[in-house]
Amino acid sequence: MTAAPASSPSYQGRASGNEDWAVTPARLEARSISKSFGGAFALKAVSVTFEPGEIHTLCGANGAGKSTLLKVMAGIHAPDSGELILNGDHLRGLTPRIAQKHGVYLVPQEPTLMGPLSALENLFVGIVPRGRLPFSVDWKAMERSAGRFFEQVGLDIDPRLPASELSIAQQQLLECARALAHSCNVIFFDEPTSPLTAHEADVLFGLMRQLRERDFTLAFISHRLDEVLAVSDRITVLRDATVVAGFDAGTATRAKLVEAMVGHAIADRQRRRRAAPDTETVLEVTGLSAPGRFSEIDFAVRKGEVLGLAGLVGSGRTEIAESIFGLRSATGRVVLGGKPFRHRSPAASIRKGLIYLPEDRGHNGVFANVELARNITAAVVPKLQRDGPLLRPAAEYEMAGHAAERTRVVAPSLHVPIKSLSGGNQQRAMFSRWLLAQPTVAIFDEPTRGVDVSAKEDIYQIIEAISDGGIAIVMISSELEELVFVCDRVIAIYEGRIVAEVAGEDITLEKLGTLAVGETAE
Amino acid sequence: MAVSQSLERMPATRGTSPQRASALRRLARRRELLLVILTLAVFLVTVAVNSGFGQGGYIAFMLADAMPLAILAVGQTIVCLVRGIDLSVAGTLGMVAVATGFLAQDYGSSVWLMLPLALGIGIGLGFVNGLFVVFARIPPIIVTLGTLIVYQGIQELICGSQTVQTLPPLYAKLGNGDFLPDIPYMLIPGVVVTSVVALLLWRTAWGRSLYAVGSSAEAAFRAGIRVNWVLISAYVVCGMLAGLGGLAFLVHYDSADSQSGLSTSINLSSIAAVLIGGTTLTGGKGGVVGSFIAALFLEVTTQAVIVLGVPQVWDQAAVGVLLLAAILVNRYQASGYSLRQALAGSRRRAPIEHGRAQ
Amino acid sequence: MNAATDTQARQLRGRRSGSDTRWVLSLVFILAAELVFFNLDVSSFWGGGWGSSVSMLGDGENFLFTSMIALGVMFVIFAGDIDLSVGAMSGFAGVMMAELHLGGMNIWLAVVVAVLVAALIGLIQGLVIAYFKLESLLVTLAGWFILQSAALAWEGAVPPAGFPGKFKSLLGTGTVAGSVPNQLVVFAVLALLATLIVHRTRFGRQLVLVGHNRDAAGYAGVRVSVTRVRAFVLSATFAAIAGMCIAATYNTADDNLGPTLLLPAITAVVLGGVDIFGGAGLVPGVIVASFILGWLTPGLLQDGVSDTWASIAIGVLLLGSLTVKGIADRGQGASLRDRLRGRFDTAAPSSPPTAPDTT
């Protein structure tokens, strides 16, 4: 009568109506796992063990390898080398489906639910309970089980709602319910709290604690150190694709975590000392609002200044930038170079010297199958050299070549499709694209996302160089360290509103960390 | 804590939204209901102008006439659910019509014998489509374009320069006769097909997996659904139904030639019927009942156009206009969801937005 | 790259070989093979002297208008859309021109008016698609139906016929210097224009970017909607010009021929290596492919093969060549799941990144 397949090894006594979720404890070990993507290492001989009855958190900076590790353990990526061992048995040839059969479920960072399908159906996709007739589906059984699972995770919705109409918090809980429906006893959460409010995060943690009491094996990735310290039983820190530290609940402190996450580099790296630029304001934003996204955004940026926008994913920073650039509508005033900028559009912005480097390089930045040179010139096509109406390819390639040189793009030639380059080089190419547009104001959204360490350094140098050259920069980043390092001023945005502004020496990790999560108190 | 009351009938997967939606919104969403009302409206208006339109015989004719299209539309719906399209249905229809037609004409074969043959040919042709889509990785529109050309060619070859003109009397009886006063035999296969397929879609794992694959092949794959198999099966079923449609065509028109299927633009009308019926090309949403009713709607409307005195040449334009209206409505519905989410003040957009409004 | 970039760029500029170029070269090879094959026992390419209608060049008058339509719809396909109305558009334009002429208008003026009106209709379709965010497949499908009816309605019971000799000769069956068909000249001009537009103008560059990734094009400051609309205008215009040639060739404006040319035209585009999702492809490929297809039927006919087999051959050729291409591109092409992700969607399919963002 239940939805759980009878052959699942992990559940005992899970008959209908039985509230006791006793599970078989599972100890999942990753031994010396290595994984690389196109030449860039995401994991280098990483060994971590996940024990039952524990919340084990993975910490690390972007690109450190946390998410990749969980994906490997959940069967989404195949490791290049290493072993996965579940209760003593080696797991081989994992796919997501097989991993689920073994009881391992990953709640992904972005829920992979099927929008038009109802919550009920999403719960059971792939394990639909059969009815009496040969191929039929037993809706009644589904509804009953669904009700139970939803209750267990605390999801209070009409199961008939299409999944696309649920809030992100609800979708995550639905994913958890799916994990339970699949009789999984090992549940991984990949950065679940980034898009959640504090309250929603608490609900999630409550659920995680309940699962822990019942001997589930839980792993959790988060950037929010306060959460990590409050919730975890064990913490493993990854940096640059390797494990660098492990802490038990009692022994971890914020300082130790930060040090492990960013390494001594941050201690060595001094904040650039710059005099506050005494120049004219090139970009001024007043009262910028878009209902449901952000409201009353006011700020100004001067020539040569680097202004950071700190905040969590989903706080609205990208939407603000897109509104200024002209990709979305918003009310309020934007003054560019002293002149009001109405009727904004990307083409108009670029013409006026305002550029925007999008956050999602893969979807909104690169033209994957297009050659490198054309990617670089993509934003300045109207300005390419011509004979009459015809373009001059030679001039174009030269221009692209010079631009690529300036940002140190490493590529076999200008003609290779950009997708064959590493993430870091692709991003360098994006920078060269936008620099070709000769901007006076540049907005960079997560400029070092998906980029290896050396490319990061290059990018910081580029940003430094161009701001020294007089370009005003707005930098959106979720990596507090880089905001600390690069910016002259930082504005913290929380749930669509500006909550604070810090400048100069006041910009510290601790300050930004608290501001980003909305705590304005010191 | 909410535990749902048992669902009585409609699954949520038709895109229903919670009860707080406005009445108008609910009506528009019940596309099938809206179409029935529209069909009746057109019918009644036309009858008011010309009472001959409402005669039993004429109604029976219209019902019978709409069935080949309806059957094709049901098959097309299945393929559209998985984000595909099948332009070759006219070719399959034509090939089956002439193949069975000549067998009937030359050997007097019984229509009941022709039925499995029609289905079998359709299954084979559909399977070819599925193979190319899945394994050769060619987009469905191109695959079915290619197979359309080939199937039509074979149809011409089968015909030579002849046409099917004389069929055993049973064929005509089934094609144009009534089994109840004013209810044609032709209606039976149409209704049966629609009901069976609707049941399959609603109540079998296969049917649900079609919706799953259509809404997100990636997520379906991760959930363990055998995406390739599902896709191929969609084209096979569509082909099978196109074969049945071919037999229906033969029986209804009591003839067949090398141009059957081509000349009546049934190909594109099947797509129009799918769209008007509420299924979108973006997959994961829709149903066959809507397509069936849409086929009836198209039939009544095109006939009404003639009866109302508009020159027959404009009947295709009428379909075109209706198609445009349907896609505008579909678009309005899709954007309505995201709009509502935005207005509801949910600061964090859910990552899934079906029909992503840009 | 660094300092070597400059040198490398200059060295490598000539070596633009990619899968697109390889495809075109394969097509040229196929075309050559076809010509040789069909001329092995047939008397000659030039037939009974230059310009004889028995020649293969002369066959051009049977397929060159298909090629013109193909060039037109190619613009739209480059941008990631599709235009199913082109066949009906050429028929409609032909009927319009003929009826205007019949009503007393000078034929050349009628030609100009018809082409302009067609462009206008293309503009309207493009605007509806871009600004109402509807799928181009469906809107142009509706457009097809509407134009077909309109053409039928306008021509009435009797298709207009009988055009001035000069017109028939210039756009139809006449030849230059007795050997090169005029239509070939018209086509050559259009082909050259199309090649330059797509590969050497700002508009063309942006058109292709839109086809590769509509979102990214928007972020890069391309005026996406304007670009797409322009493509629809071009496709309608080319279709109308083809319609003029059809009318001139057959001395009548029959609305029936046009729509049947849609499939061959799209086949030529796809066989020519243009990706149906947009972006990839070269115009010369389409040109060569249209000749391959165009000469296939008459060539087979001359060899005694019925034209039914010829059309089957076309379908097989299309599927076969794309299968080969799909397998060859397997490493680099989009996966099936990605292709499923969007077809003529309002949300354009964007190419996936190679390395997933590591977190």
Image (spheres, rainbow, N blue to C red):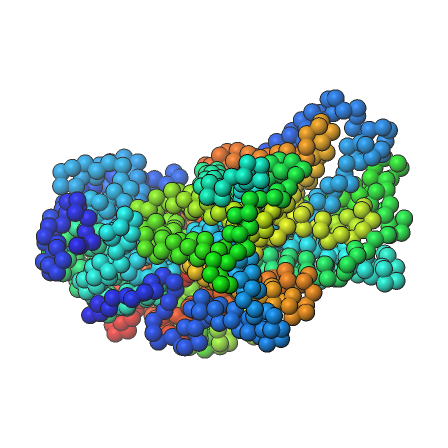
The answer to whether residue A473 is above or below residue A425 is below
Question: C284 or A372, which is in the foreground?
Answer: C284
Q: Give the image location of residue B329, x and y in percent.
A: 51, 68
Apparent side of residue B130 relative to residue A232 in the rendered image (left or right): right
The answer to whether residue A74 is above or below residue B274 is above
The answer to whether residue A378 is above or below residue B327 is above
Instruction: Write the residue at 61% across / 53% down.
Output: B265
Instruction: Write the residue at 83% across / 42% down.
Output: C173
Question: C352 or B223, which is in the foreground?
Answer: B223
Q: Is residue C354 visible?
A: no
Q: Is residue A41 visible?
A: yes
Apparent side of residue A157 relative to residue B170 in the rendered image (left or right): left
Question: C230 or B220, which is in the foreground?
Answer: B220
Instruction: Write the residue at 86% across / 40% down.
Output: C175
Q: Give the image location of residue C158, x and y in percent.
A: 79, 57
Q: Quadrant of residue C97?
A: bottom right
Instruction: Write the residue at 64% across / 41% down.
Output: B163
Q: Give the image location of residue A83, x and y in percent.
A: 22, 36
